[in-house]
Image (cartoon, rainbow, N blue to C red):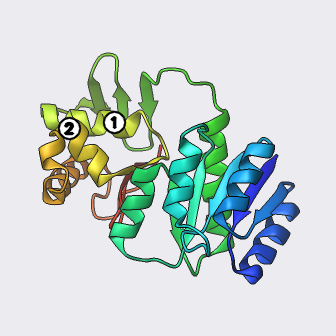
Amino acid sequence: MNILVVDDDPHIVRALAITLKGQGYTVVTATDGESALRAAAQRPIAVMILDLGLPDMEGNAVITAVREWSTVPILVLSARHGSNDKVEALDAGADDYITKPFGLEELLARLRALLRRSTEPMEEVTKVETSSFTVDLGKRQITKEGQDVRMTPTEWNILDILIRNPDKLITQQQLLTEVWGPAYAKEANYLRVYMAQLRRKLEKEPGSPRHLITEPGMGYRFVP
């Protein structure tokens, strides 16, 4: 299974190569955008780990170019901590984002999640059970501790998108656009209010949610 690591920092490339090979992956490396695109085109790639600050082109340009012909999962690994940088990368087509410095265990966990999503059969999710609640998308029914949970149409629409994309980071802009429309793409306060309501209704401990997770500055993730 080939993992393409794209970074111009030789220390990071070496550390990732050692770690990934130790986990049984085959590692392909590139130090700039052009060589990354060539490497991705020459062989099957399971996941691309991509730095945004490349010497010859922006990482987002690499993502855009790859997305013209491939759905390979892209995990961005960058020193850029600004929420705008994260959102732009995700909107360009990245699947996840980790900021430097990073923990190798977290990176490996994110990598495994991306691999699971890319290899699982694309079957329609109809029913999901968590430790706190059960959602039946077909019946539009939610139960918690044996009791039906009432949802407003907007709450249901948000939850439906998250449930159908387990473990995947859904950006604020994507949720706002799909639920309210393009004119509301920057109204993040709408989402904060509704996510708080969803957690109060569904999570056992709304203040420390286990399933409806906020990724600060980026969006939200449903973790079954």
Q: How many marks?
A: 2
Q: Depth check: 192 or 89 in front?
A: 89
At 81% from the left edge and 68% from the top edge, which residue is drawn? Answer: 17
**Residue 217 shown left or right of residue 111 in the figure:** left
Q: Are marks 1 and 2 in contact (CB under 8 Å)?
A: yes
**Residue 166 shown left or right of residue 11 in the figure:** left
Whether residue 212 is visible: no
Name above or below for residue 162 compared with residue 84: above
Residue 176 percent across, percent down from the top left: 21, 46
**Residue 185 shown left or right of residue 11 in the figure:** left
Amino acid type, callout 1:
Ile
Residue 178 percent across, percent down from the top left: 24, 37
Q: Image quarter for residue 206?
A: bottom left
Which of labels 1 and 2 is toward the front? 2
Amino acid type, callout 2:
Val
Task: Indicate the secondary structure of the residue bearing disc 2.
Answer: helix
Name above or below for residue 12 compared with residue 158: below
Q: Image quarter for residue 4?
A: bottom right
Name the residue carrying label 2.
Answer: 179
Name above or below for residue 161 compared with residue 198: above
At 60% from the left edge and 57% from the top edge, which residue is drawn? Answer: 110
Q: Residues within 10 Å of mark 2 (few under 14, many from 20)?
A: some
Residue 48 percent across, percent down from the top left: 66, 54
Q: Residues within 10 Å of mark 1 (few under 14, many from 20)?
A: some
Q: Earlier in the sequence, mark 1 or mark 2?
A: 1
Per the model, the C-alpha gap separating discs 1 and 2 is 9 Å
At 72% from the left edge and 63% from the top edge, which residue is drawn? Answer: 5
Numbered label attached to residue 161: 1
Q: Depth check: 114 or 14 in front?
A: 14
